[in-house]
Image: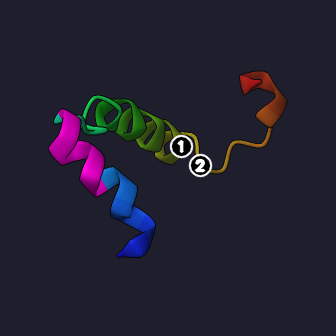
Amino acid sequence: MSIHYQNIINYFDNRSTNASAEPFNAKIKVFRVQFRGVRNVNFYN
């Protein structure tokens, strides 16, 4: 609980969350699942 203290207080002070980042994180996860097992990783760098 003490680890998230500042984020919790920030929400109540500013009504700010990380909700805008969640769709982007979901897209990254989908990308990883689709290309699991790809051998040529340098192609994506």
Q: Residues within 10 Å of mark 1 (few under 14, many from 20)?
A: few
Quarter of the image holding residue 8?
bottom left
Which is more foreground, mark 1 or mark 2? Answer: 1
Q: Is residue 42 left or right of residue 2?
A: right
CB-based contact (under 8 Å), mark 1 and mark 2: yes
Check if residue 11 falls in the magenta segment.
Answer: yes
Q: Residue 20: horizontal and vertical position, in percent?
A: 28, 28
Front in this rendered view, residue 29 or 20: 20
Front in this rendered view, residue 8 or 19: 8
Task: Please state, as top left, top right, bottom left or bottom right, where the N terminus lies in the image.
Answer: bottom left
Q: Is residue 28 left or right of residue 15?
A: right
Q: Residue 5: horizontal and vertical position, in percent?
A: 35, 63
Quarter of the image holding residue 10?
top left
Q: Provide the residue designation for mark 2.
A: 36
Which amino acid lies under the numbered mark 2 shown in the image of this protein?
Arg
Q: Residue 22: horizontal and vertical position, in percent?
A: 31, 38
The residue drawn where x is 47% and y is 36% is: 28
Task: Please state, as top left, top right, bottom left or bottom right, where the C terminus lies in the image.
Answer: top right
- Element type at mark 2: loop
Residue reaching furthest to the bottom: 1
* Label 1 – label 2 distance at C-alpha: 6 Å
Q: How is the image coloured?
A: rainbow
Total numbered labels: 2
Q: Residues within 10 Å of mark 2 (few under 14, many from 20)?
A: few
Q: Provide the residue designation for mark 1.
A: 32
- Element type at mark 1: helix
Q: Residue 43: horizontal and vertical position, in percent?
A: 78, 23
| Extent of the magenta region | 8-14
Q: Is residue 33 left or right of residue 42?
A: left
